[in-house]
Amino acid sequence: KMGIISVYIINKAGGLIYQKDFMTLYANLTSNDYLRMAGIFHGVYAIASKLSPVSLKSSGILELEADTIKLRCFQSVTGTKFIVIADPKQQNLEGFLSEVYELYSDYVLKNPFYELEQPIHNNCEKFHYNMDLKVEAINTKI
């Protein structure tokens, strides 16, 4: 049984500002691999929002589902993307990402020591602590 596997936050320029694996499913990924994955997702998201035949203002990629994982994305009004990778059976990922956005707003953006668009480091302890609690609560229910 899985649950929440990884969480990523990508700034509006496509830079990875937060990444944490809550389960180890990937073999030996380096920090550069994570940066590349964030950049690729940012580019594919932008392309998908331009190619949508449905409307002039597409929301881009909301969800990708495979046999072993589900990826869900939420983009804030400022262009910051919040991404969760989870078990395909995991429910309410949209609600989870809303809660992550709330944690980000409360504990990162309101932190006077945080520089906008920069990686979220240890000076945002409350963010890291509450993120771990939230994921642990979901992953232990399973």
Image (cartoon, rainbow, N blue to C red):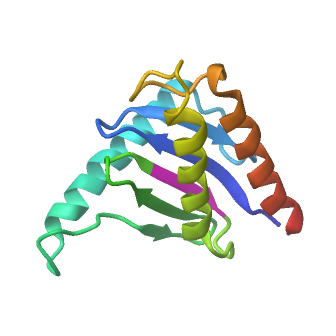
Q: Residue at x 15, y 77 (%)?
A: 55
Quarter holding residue 56: bottom left
Note whether 122 is above or below 13 in the view shown: above
Whether residue 24 is visible here, answered yes or no, is no
Secondary structure mostly seen in the magenta stretch: strand
Whether residue 12 is visible here, answered yes or no, is yes
Pick the residue in front: 104 or 58: 104
Q: Residue at x 44, y 59 (%)?
A: 74
Q: Residue at x 15, y 62 (%)?
A: 50
Image spot of residue 77 (x, y percent): 32, 54
Quadrant of the drawing holding the C terminus: bottom right
Confirm whether the magenta stretch covers residue 5.
Answer: no
Note whether 106 is above or below 67 in the view shown: above
Q: Residue at x 54, y 69 (%)?
A: 94
Quadrant of the drawing holding the N terminus: bottom right
Judged left or right of residue 53, residue 127 is: right
Pick the residue in front: 121 or 6: 121
Judged left or right of residue 133, residue 128 is: left
Judged left or right of residue 122, residue 57 is: left
* Magenta residue span: 82-86
Pick the residue in front: 22 or 105: 105
Image spot of residue 126 (x, y percent): 71, 34
